[in-house]
Image (spheres, coloured by chain):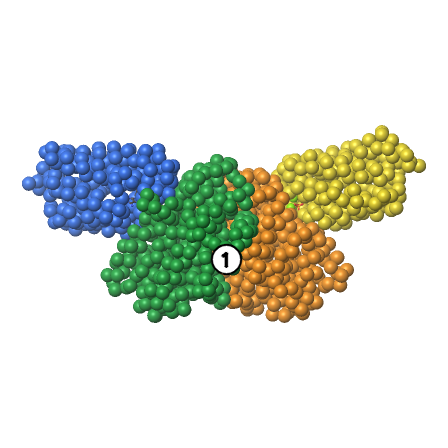
Chain colours: A orange, B green, C yellow, D blue
Amino acid sequence: MKKLINDPKNVVDEAARGIEAAHGDLVDVFYDPIYIVRKGGPVQGKVALVSGGGSGHEPLHGGFVGFGMLDAAVPGPVFTSPTPDPILAATKAVDGGAGVLHIVKNYTGDVLNFETAADLAAADDIEVRSVIINDDVAVKDSLYTAGRRGVAGTVLVEKIAGASADRADDLDTVTAIAQKVNDQMRSMGVALTPCVVPHAGEPSFTLADDEIEIGIGIHGEPGRERIKLEPADAIVDRLLGPILEDLPFASGDKVLLFVNGMGGTPQIELYIVFRRAAEVLAERGIEVTRSLVGNFVTSLEMQGASITVLKLDDELTELWDAPVQTAALRWGR
Amino acid sequence: MKKLINDPKNVVDEAARGIEAAHGDLVDVFYDPIYIVRKGGPVQGKVALVSGGGSGHEPLHGGFVGFGMLDAAVPGPVFTSPTPDPILAATKAVDGGAGVLHIVKNYTGDVLNFETAADLAAADDIEVRSVIINDDVAVKDSLYTAGRRGVAGTVLVEKIAGASADRADDLDTVTAIAQKVNDQMRSMGVALTPCVVPHAGEPSFTLADDEIEIGIGIHGEPGRERIKLEPADAIVDRLLGPILEDLPFASGDKVLLFVNGMGGTPQIELYIVFRRAAEVLAERGIEVTRSLVGNFVTSLEMQGASITVLKLDDELTELWDAPVQTAALRWGR
Amino acid sequence: MSLGIDWVTDWIRESARVVSEHRVELITLDREIGDGDHGENLDRGFSAVIQKLDGLPEGAVPSDALKLVATTLISTVGGASGPLVGTAYLKAAGAVGKEERLDGAAVVALLTAARDGVVLRGKAEPGDKTMIDAWTPAVDAAAAALADGRDEVGILEAAADAAETGAEATEPLVARKGRASYLGERAIGHRDPGSQSSALILRAAADTAAKNAGSGSDAAGAS
Amino acid sequence: MSLGIDWVTDWIRESARVVSEHRVELITLDREIGDGDHGENLDRGFSAVIQKLDGLPEGAVPSDALKLVATTLISTVGGASGPLVGTAYLKAAGAVGKEERLDGAAVVALLTAARDGVVLRGKAEPGDKTMIDAWTPAVDAAAAALADGRDEVGILEAAADAAETGAEATEPLVARKGRASYLGERAIGHRDPGSQSSALILRAAADTAAKNAGSGSDAAGAS
Ligand SMILES: Nc1ncnc2c1ncn2[C@@H]1O[C@H](COP(=O)(O)OP(=O)(O)O)[C@@H](O)[C@H]1O
Ligand SMILES: Nc1ncnc2c1ncn2[C@@H]1O[C@H](COP(=O)(O)OP(=O)(O)O)[C@@H](O)[C@H]1O
Ligand SMILES: [Mg+2]
Ligand SMILES: [Mg+2]
Ligand SMILES: [Mg+2]
Ligand SMILES: [Mg+2]
């Protein structure tokens, strides 16, 4: 294992200190338990957004704390959900009296730990709602699975719901908008190489030199199928097919197209992927009116990418365009 | 070789098409020869900034075209300087009558090709100046080398000189500011793993499982020494030492600290690096007043990072803070 | 003979030891069909428990120790297993009330409540390829052993044996809960890490019960 | 006997062929002490040249073909070698004026101008571990062969032999120009890729000269 780390045990703590040192103008970082909140304390009367989950997906979630997006991020150990304690502490720290929305990726651990924290917050008279993100079409959503996973689309929910909260929408509205974004987006990813969790020290899975994993999860969980390496265009077609059929997206739809890097993929490749995805959407009469390309929801050093398509309407577009000022996503101020 | 590409020969062209599809609101992309210009054509009376070089360092340079930064970027083949033709075409396309500044990383190929393009532009009555970026302290700057390489600091020059040009400074001033940024910054990098150039298909160098390369160049050129893997803090100390001694930076200095990912390094590791670098600077009485963390000047999928320290004064700080609106760096609008 | 606070604390210490000893094995199992952190998660949790164990007040009863384990695991493990295993201990603590000594029936009640706690939070059924596939046979075997008139040690040994068999029996299964459920058919042939750690913890219960019974350290206060 | 346009175009075609044939070798050399693109760069450039070569007008003279190579390489190769090798052909074209036939003296003038062009742009000295270390011995050997009264084929063979020896002789050197200069002592033991490609191109010159002389294809218009 080759990493720019000191001790695997200190990875999350030391990275949080780095975030504090680099982005002290945007965020305050608390330790023991670790959570990151928007500079300037809770905004009275504003719905607060809290997200979190295992670390290793940076900039998710800490990079999205700031005006127009999250009020707090709670980083767990690498690829492991945080416990209820820091979630509760963060929830209390950002509550401005208008309620708190938990944005939770659909993994058993995240769901259970956020659930416990929400129960404890409720006991302290904080109104908490949750939206469970499950945009990954690679996994069958059925009684026979833990349900679809929350993957890259999470960042779209955080941005759009964040804009809703910062324009002073109430908790019902913010929750409904977050839910709508989740319901209108679909994602699927591919891995070319595995990632190495620091405390494990070994690749999280193995792929032969000519194999790729279609439908990979953001923790290196295997996906739909393992196939031989193909040209980028063929891979994009494999990812987009299930995405477009699932909602389904239709000719005339306006969408946000998001090509997300898994952490170890050169950006030049992400643009090659974007190019093909935009081409396929155009062929189907689907109009890409907003776009996002880059490493936003990563899996450590994994090479690969995911595609997310979000169906836009005027309101979602307006909220997407609204000013945002975070370490990893910023415009308009 | 595992990459999200189609044919190695089409990598740069297809990525340019992806940039066009994703960032059509910010840039126009030309093909044959390929160059990327700021949307809206040349700004009359404004000094135009053109940069370029081999591809594979994305978002450098195409991701930095837009308001407050570059007017044009010229991507050569992967890791190979563009020829004079697209440099000349881009120079002509963005000239607004106030002259053009070429920002050139100090590699023989880049210098020679930009030089030829500048000569040809001069023959067309366009006033061209050049600033050669050579911030890499890993290489001895002497008669016995091709001189120091231009590495991550390039993005700082592009940002600050871009702000100077967009506030309507004249060519002399913009050139002087770009030169000043170059002269006041120092960088050094480390590689944990090599990168694979698509048309080569093999790693650009080899490192044993426990080896790292201190002083790596952004094309995988070897650096100062190959050592055994060390904890992140020790590596940071090895990089920062030569940087701080070289200018030298002194107690009381205000600096911009920039931790740049080489493309394949998880962002969580970049923050661990930032944390230690900030700590060392604080110990020496050097104040970090601005910061940048992320993958800005990459080497394909190489794992590793570089540290750049730029000495700031009020003017440079003001220009750094000025609005910028590009695909990869954006604030204030 | 019955089991008291010494057994509970011995069991906890031994659980911590075996989890630490099998950390890499559990990580490896989880890497195969999950995300490779199960051993790390439990090890972090039980290490924290050990740190706190000495702080148990004089005169603490079994439920005090079990509650301490519950809250510490919930606060330190995270992931799926943190709330699940934490809840198991929390419900186990509730099941044994303020009793100082646990007889066979109490041990069975403890195990049953623990299992029910996991089901309450995780909604898994037997055969879903989760820790429930170790716990449910363990609870059934414990109940049968009680009915057969076996003592606390015998009950816990029956539970541990059944848990081990149950963990092994997860191997041919397709998962329907947790991360392994994403794998579909590809989970076949791999043992569920949570069932394996559960078997280890139940074996620790049996081993320490035998030692406590053997050394007679509990005998002093025995009824 | 002398060499005309047919030799020049044959030389160019053969250069393109050997560069393509040795593409991977040149990439490998460049990967060791540079950035691994030298074979790709030259191959891209010479492929472009070949595409354009048929467009040479009827009655073209050697300098026309050399200028075509120059501008095409400058426009398509990029990197360090594009401007350097391109300038070599540009200066070579200038050196042979509008001559239709090149005698020994003209061949030496061509080679000398080519080398001088590389030096003009790249400022390298012999021993800097660059393509100059193939070109300079080649020019010297060509001049000596001319003085010895050898014909064009003999002159080019002497140049090619010397270039090959020169390329080999870059191996023990520390580089002072180009990317390899960053390596310091670590460049020792590796051959400079540009010197190797230069030797290949000069060998192509000699081989095609021999063929042209042998086949007598040039004889028709010989003086
Ligand atoms: N819904 C559930 N009910 C019971 N046990 C579960 C459930 N989901 C997961 N588990 C157990 O949790 C184990 C994984 O725990 P761990 O690796 O620590 O958490 P995570 O899956 O969040 O990384 C699985 O092996 C399985 O035994
Ligand atoms: N200043 C120079 N003078 C002469 N030749 C040089 C100089 N710099 C580099 N070269 C030659 O160029 C070759 C490298 O060419 P190439 O790999 O195509 O370009 P780049 O170094 O830009 O990747 C070197 O092997 C060397 O022979
Ligand atoms: Mg986990
Ligand atoms: Mg090159
Ligand atoms: Mg796990
Ligand atoms: Mg090269």
As shown in the figure, which amino acid type bears the numbered disc 1? Gly
Report the front residue among A146 and D200: D200
Report the front residue among B201 and A246: B201
Residue C90 rendering spot, x and y as whole percentages = 79, 47
Picture quadrant of ligand 5: top right
Q: Quadrant of residue B233?
A: top right
- Read off the residue under disc 1: B252
- Asked whether residue A216 is in view, the answer is yes
Q: Is residue A148 left or right of residue C103?
A: left
Mark 1 lies on a secondary structure that is: loop
Q: Quadrant of residue B95?
A: bottom left
Residue at image position (62%, 67%) is A165
Residue at image position (53%, 43%) is B234
Residue A62 rendering spot, x and y as whole percentages = 59, 56
Indicate if the residue with disc 1 has its beta carbon within 8 Å of ligand 2. no
Residue at image position (12%, 42%) is D106
- Asked whether residue B30 is in view, the answer is no
Mark 1 nearby-residue class (10 Å; few <14, some 14–19, many ≥20): few
Report the front residue among D80 and A303: D80
Residue A103 rendering spot, x and y as whole percentages = 64, 58
